[in-house]
Amino acid sequence: MNLEHLKELVQHAFDELKQNQSEISYKQLVDFHAQHKYLYFCYNVSGKTQLGRIVANSSKESVERVYERYEAELKQVLNSDISNGRVVNALAHMAGYFKKDLSTEERQALMDRIERLANQLEDLPLVLAQIHAYAVQYHQTYIAQQRIFDLIK
């Protein structure tokens, strides 16, 4: 599986989210967004931010309207090209969750792996596996739940 294949999985997951509800739930959309945040980061950072604004719903739109707007923006985000730089940026942000947990050496080793990925000298699944292991080890559930880890499952 590669990141491009994840587009289909995200769209399918969103379609299921909408179909499997007898009543549309705002909380389920918030949870969906939270689980996909770092995956969106890989596609389009400004689109990720816009999706977050839609979910925040500061204009107090109906849940149905929020879903409609989210779906339209999601399609635009997923139509963006993935860049190695955005993947590296997403991983660096995820690594930031462990800055207080890792020793200086461990933190540097992780950042070195991410840098090697940036230079195409490291495989993405290996870096993801290490970040996921740290998320589990240090009980960072927000990071552990990220759907970008579907690449290694």
Image (cartoon, rainbow, N blue to C red):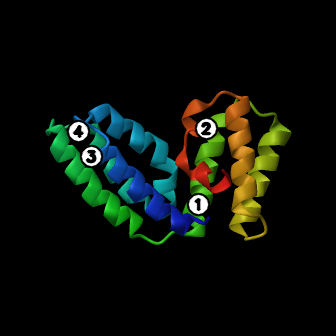
Disc 1 residue type (three-letter) = Val
Secondary structure at numbered mark 3: helix
Q: Residue at x 54, y 34 (%)?
A: 142
Disc 4 residue type (three-letter) = Asn
Name the side, left or right, on which 87 lies relative to 37.
Answer: right
Sequence-earlier tag: 2 or 3: 3
Sequence-earlier tag: 1 or 3: 3
Distance Cα–Cα, label 2 vs label 4: 26 Å
Disc 3 residue type (three-letter) = Ile
> Which residue carries the number 2 mark?
144
> Which residue carries the number 1 mark?
87
Distance Cα–Cα, label 2 vs label 1: 17 Å
Secondary structure at numbered mark 4: loop
Q: Which mark is residue 57?
A: 4
Name the side, left or right, on which 24 lies relative to 112.
Answer: left
Classed neighbour count for the residue bearing mark 1: other residues with Cα under 10 Å, few (<14), some (14–19), many (≥20): many
Asked whether residue 49 is in view, the answer is no
Label 2 close to label 3 by CB (< 8 Å): no
Disc 2 residue type (three-letter) = Ala
Asked whether residue 17 is in view, the answer is yes
> Which residue carries the number 3 mark?
54
